[in-house]
Image (tube, coloured by chain):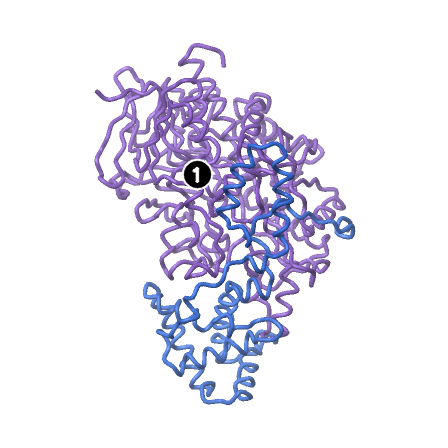
Amino acid sequence: MATTYDVIVVGSGACGGWAAMELSRAGMKVLMLEAGAPVNQAKDFHHTFLYQMDYRGQGKPGMLRRYSGSERNYRIMIDSQENPYTTTPDTVYRWGRSRCLGGRTLHWARASDRMADYEFKAASRDGYGMDWPISYADLKPYYDRVESFIGVSAAMEGLPQFPDGVFLPPMGLTCAEAIFTAAAKSLAWPTTHRRLAQLTRIHNGRPSCHYCGNCVNGCDVGAMFSTVSTTLPPALKTGNLEVRTDCVAALVRMNSENRAQGVSYIERYTMRPVDVDAKYVVLAASTLENTRLLLLSAKGGLANSSGALGQYMMDQVGGGGVSGYLPKLKGGPSRLDDGKSAGITIPNFHNIDAKTQRQDFIRGYVMNATGGQTEFPQFAASLPGYGSAWKKEVKSRYVAQARVWIAGGEMLAQKENGVTLDPEVKDHWGIPVLKIHFQHCDNDRKIIADFQQKAEELFRKAGGEIMPGMERGGPTGFPGAPGSPDRPAEGAPARQRALGGSIHEVGTARMSASPKDGVLNSFCQTHDVENLYVFGGNAFVTSGDKHPTLTMMALTARGCDHLLERAQGKKV
Amino acid sequence: MLPTRRDLLEILARASALPGAAQFLAAWQSAGEHQHANNAPPEPPLLRDYQPQFFDAADFAALQSLCEILIPTDDTPGAREAHCAHFIDFLLHNADAVPQLQQQWRSGLASLQEAGFHAADAAGRAALVEAMARPERERGTTHPLYSVYRLVKQQNAFAFYTSRAGMIETLDYRGNSYNATFPACTHPEHHVV
């Protein structure tokens, strides 16, 4: 007879890993389904110099078009030929995805910020959209719990718009970051160390960072938070978790009592369909995959009495920025500047309160700045000249490189932005794919324009010089490398930046106080199906200006408490 | 002998359970911090033993010469030591999936030959490169081979600065290493505007 589990968790990323850990530790029998392959950080991730790879990180010409990664890490990215998606004709959207144990936690940027009340209650202030049904106070204990466990290195600042948390010591500033910090302070802008889920000391049995700068290629020792390094080991230790990899979830099966019966999945290689049953179903397969599963599970979408499923999709505004060099550092010695892969953060200082209210746009944005030595001098080919003089100039500017970029700008929740099932296109397993419709609104564009002006102001204040051809550089990457921020999406008109580049997609099943207004309640339980929870960015009512992962994990922790209260009848 | 990465991982795993582990590791690791250039692994033999397969001998020799004019060997290595032309040939030989890229380079080298680059002596080649590169310095000027110059310059710069000779021996890249602490800025002049 088939086993009945207490909970099926679909997905193994930041939220799936957390849910599996919390629920299995509480004694529940948990089955985790992961569509991709297993990952072993010690065996699969290495320090690799560009020159050790045949194609220097770019892959065989043409090969990496299928992935959003580099030659180093494409194996932990999704194969877009097996997993296509479509867009409406007026949409240029790049959906960065992973299918492997740990998902995007294996190569994420690790930025871990708390959202503040001005983001949860933005609608009350400016009248646009809807407030979240929760406030910062509701989430604070869960932010504390998540940070304490995963380890976040950061500095306490006492800024109301950038709430402090339970932090490990911050990493030191590089010379360029010190210069940008001084420049921001002289402009009376707030600054802090970038808050990162990256250990600065031994924490919960994990080693501290060794500052190799390889984070997005997978951390070989688990000093950065990932499911594989952090949440999966204690979950497996309970003996209550079974992990099945290479299992592609196809839908949530319902019973006649309007309860989720379980999940149907397809074995990735054999194509065999399998049904598994459980008392509770948790979708944590990433924001858009969660919504896809709900759309696939019932005509018109499961748990969609509100009609809001698939709507109000957001990312965060990005693009633009300034690159160049800092003359103060030119010609200096080589340093380990990119070893921590970080930067400084300039928290939002617009529309926080009456004093900071802007007339030209609502909501706000966060900036980042960094500089110094990188793996590859991206500017070199843009620097006029050649010969020994050019070579010396490259070297002297190489240690002085600098850039300011937008970390997260709030994108307004527009009803029309979102996903539906494509009626024609199916993936490798015959499962209908998503069609994405996504456009900026005027407010988004005004935020980008304001950021661009502020980025230049900061750069000038730091004494920086903008390099020819480098005005629109991103934080990392080589010219036109797959996944680099300057690379347009396949088939995009020249110079048009694809949306989705932030990889901060949220919304499409927002939480609401009333079942009329959203798909989820404030615990990420669906309003319509009592034993179905959705963990990820789906619940977001506003995108906020913070990196979303920590908030997704705090929402997951809160949702797990709620699930456990109902399942075990005890207050957690 | 310097410890290997595996040794370090094993020590890290054991040491993390011990009191005072961080201090021990700090002292142990800092011993290796100043030997980075020696620690960076050697270049794999791929290009050292490589025979051109995409370009014919005349075109390859011309490309090699142009790469070395653009990135010469001086007090640090240049395109020659970095095997830049070999890398470009290797890349194009394996670019079947992008035929337009292969065609761009074939016609680029053909244009160079027509302009006399292949047959010219060192002084003639230097003069031609200077003319080709002029629009980069002087806006408004043009040269029929400017696009060829940009094509070679871009790929040559990529080949050079991603090689061991460019990345480690010329730029002294410090990342991709094991470090006990992050070296923060200690310069007072960087903390004021």
Residue projecting furthest to the front? B1
* Relative vertical location of residue B134 with respect to residue A359 in this rendering, above or below: below
Question: Is the residue marked by circle 1 packed among few (<14), some (14-19), or many (20+) residues within 10 Å?
Answer: many
Question: Residue A437 vs residue A264: left or right?
Answer: right
| Chain displayed in blue | B
Q: Residue at x 55, y 75 (%)?
A: B70
| Chain displayed in purple | A
Query: Residue B58: x and y, percent?
Result: 40, 83
Chain containing the residue with disc 1 = A
Foreground pick, A314 / B186: B186
Figure quadrant of the N terminus of chain A: top left
Residue projecting furthest to the top? A569
- Tally the marks: 1
Which quadrant would residue A308 be assigned to in this image? top left
Q: Which residue is drawn at 60% across and 45% down?
A: A342
Foreground pick, A458 / A228: A228
* Relative vertical location of residue A556 with respect to residue B65 in this rendering, above or below: above
Question: Residue B128 vs residue B186: left or right?
Answer: left
Query: Residue A344: x and y, percent?
Result: 64, 44
Q: Which residue is drawn at 63% across and 65% down?
A: A395
Which quadrant would residue A396 be assigned to in this image? bottom right
Foreground pick, A22 / A559: A22
Query: Residue B79: x and y, percent?
Result: 52, 73
Residue A362, can we see it?
Answer: no
Q: Look at label 1 and name its amino acid.
A: Asn
Provide the residue designation for mark 1.
A417
* SS class, disc 1: loop
* Relative vertical location of residue B31 with respect to residue A249 in this rendering, above or below: below
Query: Residue B134: x and y, percent?
Result: 58, 78
Residue A15, can we see it?
Answer: yes
